[in-house]
Image (cartoon, rainbow, N blue to C red):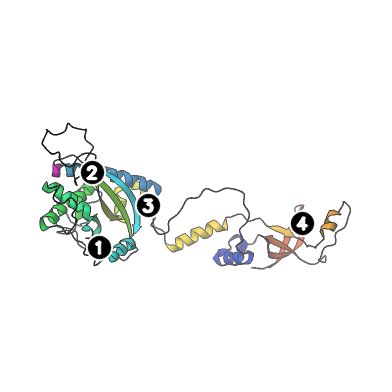
Amino acid sequence: MTDSLNNPGRARIQQLLAAIGSRQQDDGSKIETSAYDWHQPHFFSTQQRKDLAGFCERSAAVIAQKFGALCRQNFEVTISSLSEHFAGQFLGQESSGAGQTQNPTNYYLPFGLAQSREGKPTAEESCGFVSIPPQTALIWTTQLLGDTDSKENAVGPLSELETSLLFDICSLIVQALTETSDGKAGFRVAADNMSNRLPLALKGEEEFCKITIQVKKPLVSAKPGPPKGEVSPKADAPGAAGGGSAGSECHILVLCEKLVPVLSDTQASTKFSAKDITQAIQSHIETIPVPITAQLASVPVTVEQLLNLAPGDILVLDKKIDDPGGLIVAGKMVCRGRLAKSAGKYAMVVTETLF
């Protein structure tokens, strides 16, 4: 084979595919496949996701300790989901909720990686935020205030005191992330108060890791009822202990690239350029085996003639002795050539390419 055939290049591959078409060939083999969501980033490798899950579980344990110390009660903090998203999804949610005064939006607290140990990160250094749904904000603040019944069903704007308490709670969450990273990522709060607007300037294509945590009190064993004439406390009140409370959720969103330092050193994320990806795909295509059929000539016959064929019969083809044959790929002729022999085997000398 000539060098041009050994290294066909992208243009030649496209010409070949255009010549033979894209007709799917019958293949009886079964290939296992998995769904791939193109609407979500796939920043982390499989091993990195396992490392990230371990980091989140350790962070949840630290958050539980800090919540317990703040409220002087025990809490169960678990990771209910861990996913990757493009920032455009958050921008869409924010714009769809704008102007809705009847339904308060989430409360946000940004954080980042400060260059110095003093002061808070700048807006440019912010790399994530804590997102608190209104119902969760109500549960947490009333838990701290010790007033679990007065706002059981009321979800509205928080008071200045409640907002300050919510800021303290979110700051503990950010501190927990830093402590869990073992010095690999120093996350620090990047604002002085909570906000009802997304705190980061996003373009839409940024890749975020979304960590959803659930906070609830552990189940307690049943206790004897109160003395006659007394009313037992409501177990279903927000923040109440026991099995009646379904718990509360909040979300931590961090730029994926900023979480790489907390993963194993050998699992650093590798980014490939579009050119690298194109070359890798082309290199793979060039190594795919393609069966080629050498065809001398053909002739149409009827079914009766076909059934009457017997050893010794002569079938006259539709080409002369000197007419070229063809090389067939996927039912399409891609080259013409003449019959030859090489090392005692049939061969075909290519005289013309058709792609």
Question: Front-most of 4 and 122?
Answer: 122
x then y, percent, for residue 220: 21, 35
Residue 174 marker:
none
The type of residue carrying mark 1 is Leu
Mark 2 vs 1, N-terminal side:
1
Displayed quadrant of residue 354: bottom right
Residue designated by label 2: 245
| Contact flag, marks 2 and 1 (Cβ < 8 Å) | no
User: Which residue sits at x=31%, y=46%?
Assistant: 80
Give residue 341's mark.
4
Locate residue 291, reporting x and y percent. 66, 55
As drawn, is 121 to the left or to the right of 328? left
Q: CA distance from mark 3 to mark 1?
A: 22 Å
Going from N to C along the chain, the mark reached first, 3 or 1, is: 3
Sequence-earlier tag: 1 or 4: 1
Q: CA distance from mark 1 to mark 4?
A: 72 Å
The earlier-in-sequence mark between 3 and 4 is 3
Q: Mark 2 touching mark 3, by CB under 8 A? A: no
For mark 3, give the secondary structure.
loop
Specify the segment rendered in magenta: 69-74
Q: Rounded to the nearest whole Å, what is the CA distance between mark 2 and mark 1? A: 33 Å
Instruction: Please tell me which of labels 2 and 3 falls first in the chain.
Output: 3
* Mark closer to the observer (3, 1): 1
Q: Quadrant of residue 217?
A: top left
- The residue tagged 1 is 200
Q: Can you name the residue that lies furthest to the front here? A: 229
The answer to whether any part of residue 181 appears in the image is no
Q: Nearer the viewer, residue 148 or 85?
A: 148
The reply to whether the magenta stretch includes residue 72 is: yes
Tell me if residue 207 can be seen: yes
Vertical placement of residue 316 versus 244, above or below: below
